[in-house]
Each structure stands twice: as structure tokens, then as C-alpha cells.
Amino acid sequence: MRNRLWLSALLLVLGVGVAGTAGGSTGRDAREGGIFRISFLAFDYIDPALAYSGESWALLDTTCARLMTLPDKPTPEGFRLVPEVAADFPRISRNGKTYTFRLRSGFRFSDGTPVRASAFARAINRTLAEGIESPALQYTGDIAGAANVQSGKSQAAAGVTARGNTLVVRFTRPIGDFAAKTAMPFFCAVPPELPPDPEGVGPFPSAGPYVVTEYRPGERVTIRRNRFYRGARPHHVDGFDVDLRASGPAEVLDRVERGDADWGYVIAPSYFEPGRRLVAKHGVNKSQFFVRPGLILRHLVFNSARPLFRDNVQLRRAVNFAINRRALARTATGTPLSDRLTDQYLPPSLPGFSDADIYPLERPNLERANALARGNLRARQAVLYTNNSPQPLAVAQAAKQQLAEIGLDVELRPLPGPALLSRITQPGEPWDMVLILWAPDFVDPFTYLNGLFDPRVPSGGNIGRFDSTMFNALMRKAARLQGRERYRAYGELDVQLSRDAAPSAPISFFTDPTLVSRRVGCVVLRPTLDLTAVCLK
């Protein structure tokens, strides 16, 4: 089973950007209609049970109707979970194992068929079907009866019940984030008779603002309006023509700069190649080139199961005061546009985030760091595991030099990515710190706090084996909340966890650059381009 959430946490690729507020051209520049042109160099599936790339998720966002969704608005409102086809937030049982969704009427597939609860039940069961290696299994595998569907003993999970406009999903353990998970494309409404296919199905009726009308792998995707859509999402253009034949990132960006394409999806470092000079030509966050706070957290994780950091919050806090976050981020990417520095675990673009100014961002506070480290250095030696590729290794070497200032002798152990993943998850492996990234699939505070530090969450994120009776209770209490109360509770918990427990040393969030053509208006970034909301000038 693929797991982008965990693998992305360890693939130390570069990301670049700069902090800013979301927005760009507005509806005042807009006209209705026209075809938005997209250039991609890679693509996996249009089947929501199998799609698992940034490109495919960007397109499926235009065609999906989901139980819960993220609004087509700038952040932080654009990251505030709201009902879409669901009439309200789900009712959750006291034990946290059962979610009940009531659906609103009025949503229709592009063939005119009404959307019922059976459309969402089918979406779930397609991810579980025998022979379908869906990446969604990491999110649907704990549904009651899931194993029977996977083995072919049943066509539908016993824990998924659809009657009219009521969907009930039962899990085998308490789940604190299923409502947020339903905003992922895996859970798009699909026709109840849509079969599972290991190769992925072709075009099929969809219930969002748009529908895929043609898909030729390796050549093109054609998307047009769903004439039966009556939902609330803004949608201005008549459709999207997607060219899948770009030879590389440079060609994608060249097409956008020439105006042959309106947008394309490429990895962040491509935007900052020295010869491209996007900042010089367009400025930042004006009309064509945008850079927004992203969601990938770079942090230095402490192994709380090892003698050095076990029950040693003073030393964990000392490291947070001793590291030079600006220098570490600059070492990794060479540009101030690469990161948004942070001393907390929640992205600053998330609702409820509270900037508490806990540790220094631009320079270390060695006086405070040495005061906390004094008497708590124990053996004075630490083993730091890191990826052996040049950028993360350089960051680790810089961290080693910085921590020597508080009397900590750091031994570096560089490892290839797969070996690093395998080693740090083994109990008893002799590492004290590891430099990694965390990149969740969906936007919810649970994925950062519970996902990283709650030992009961089987996401693989709590590699430092942090286990605090008090914070476990606080994280699980916050997970039971919904709406604004949830964001407020997690915002307070983020501050408390970083300040009082310091299970890791957060360094920065990567940020995401976006380039659009001159004719693009209605630029909504969350943090990359919201295709559904775009318009043409």
C-alpha cells in the first residue's frame, strides 16, 4: 500500500516560497466562460479511488462533490472544513467509532441522476475492493468489515450503510479526523454502479461543478461544466483543456510564460532556477507569480524513548532555543523565499493558529539555551540520523555545529531515504534526533498534533515515541470537537505542546509557488491554485 503522508515525511525534497496573504486577481477582473489551459508533465488517474498525485487531485477538485469540503476561499478560511453534500457536520458516537452523515438534496451527477448516500458508500467500497491497491486504504482500512471486502468475501463493508440521504460509517477503533478525511478526492461521490478497476476507470458522471469528458493517457484530459450542478462553489470558466505531453518542468513554465498555457503543476525548485528570474519579471504576490505558506513541516524530532531526551523537557527546550532556524532553512535551499520559519507545529495558514513567539526564529538565544541545558546534558552525546542527500545532510551538519554551543556533541549518521525510514521506525534503534519532513494528505490540525505525537494514532508519524498522559488526553479531547471549537482547541494545544513539552524542534514550513498566465483572474491559493474558482480576464 502506498502512503504519501508517511513517505512524503521522509523524502527531503526542496520546496520554495514566501509568506503572504492569499488572493490575487478578483472577480472584478473576471469574465464568465472560456477554456482554461493546463500543462502537465505527469499524471496518474482520473479515478478517485486510485488518483494520488498533485496533478490529478487538482483536476478532481473541480469534478468532485464531497460530504465535507474546504471552501474556495483564501486561507485561513479556505482551510476551514465545511459541509458540502452533507447537510451539517456528522454526528459522532460517544466512543468515536461511528459517523452519521445526513445529506442535503439538490446535487446531481452530470447525467442528471440524484446524488444519494449510496454514491459515497460506493466511493468507500471501491477503495476496499479486491485487487484494487488504493492509497485510500490507509484511511478506509479501519472501517468495520473492510478486510472482508479486500479479501473478496464481501462486495461492501459491513460498517458502511447507506439509506436514502443517510450515510453511516462504523470503525473498529476511535477515529478523530474522518470528517476532514472526506474532503479528499478518495471520497468523491461516484455513481453507485461504478465498478472498481485496478487500472482505473475512464470518464464517468461526476457531481461537482465540472466533469471529465475525455481522457487519453499520456495525451490530454478534457473537462467541461456539469450542466446539472446547482451547488454553491464558484465556477467561471467553461472548462479545462489539459495537455499531458510536457517534457519537463522547464517546458511547463515556458508554456505559461509564453501564454500557451494558463497554469501548470511542477515541483517548487523549478520556479527558482537562476535563469528563470520570475521574481525580477513579475514580482511576488502581484498578478502572475505567487508564493504562499505551505503545509510541509521540517522539524528535528527527539527520540523520547532514548535516555538523552526521555523525561528531559529542559534539554528538548534548550535545543529549540539553540538552533538557528534562519540559517538552517537557508542552508537547505539557498534562498529566503524557500521557507516560512516556525517554532510551532500547526501551519500558520490553518484556522485557529496562534503565533505565540515561543522560540527565536531569526537567531538563537544561547543564553537561555545554556541555562536550560545546564545539568540536563546527561552523556553530552547525541546521534543524529539524516537523509544522505546533499541538502538535508548540509542542514544536519549546520545543526551539529549549532548544538555544540550548548555542549552537545552530535554524531551524524547519514542514510539513504528508504534505509532512514526503515531504521528510525525500529524500536531500539540508537538515534537521538532525526531531521525529517511531515506532509499530510489532508488539512486538519489532527494530522499535525495527533498524527505526530499521539501514540494511539497509527499514522507512523510519532517516530519519536512521545507519550505524555496529559497531552494524550488533551489531543484526544480536541479530536472529538468539530467546527470552530476544534480549531480553537487545537490552536491553544499547539502553543502548549511546543512551549511545555517540545517533542520536536520545528524549523520551517515550505511554501508553494504558483505561476499563471496574464489572462488568468480570480486567483485563489490554498496554497496552490484553486482551479474551480479561476476565471479569465
Image (tube, rainbow, N blue to C red):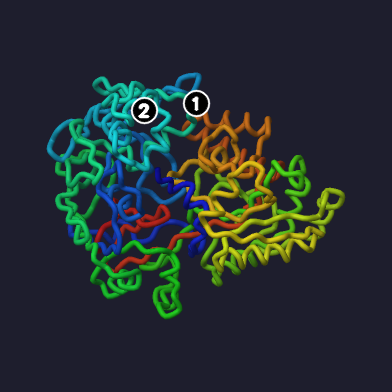
Q: Position of residue 375 (x, y in %)?
A: 87, 49
Type of the residue with mark 1: Pro
- Taking the image as shown, residue 470 lies to the left or right of residue 149, namely right
- Taking the image as shown, residue 220 lies to the left or right of residue 147, namely left
Type of the residue with mark 2: Ala
Q: The N terminus appears in which quarter of the rendering?
A: top left
Badge 1 is on which residue?
174
Q: Residue at x 31, y 74 (%)?
A: 254
State whether residue 238 appears in this view.
no
- Of label 2 and label 1, which has the lower sequence position? 2
SS for callout 1: loop
Q: Residue at x 32, y 69 (%)?
A: 248
Q: Position of residue 221 (x, y in %)?
A: 20, 56
- Taking the image as shown, residue 442 lies to the left or right of residue 414, namely left
Q: Nearer the viewer, residue 511 or 298?
A: 298
Badge 2 is on which residue?
146
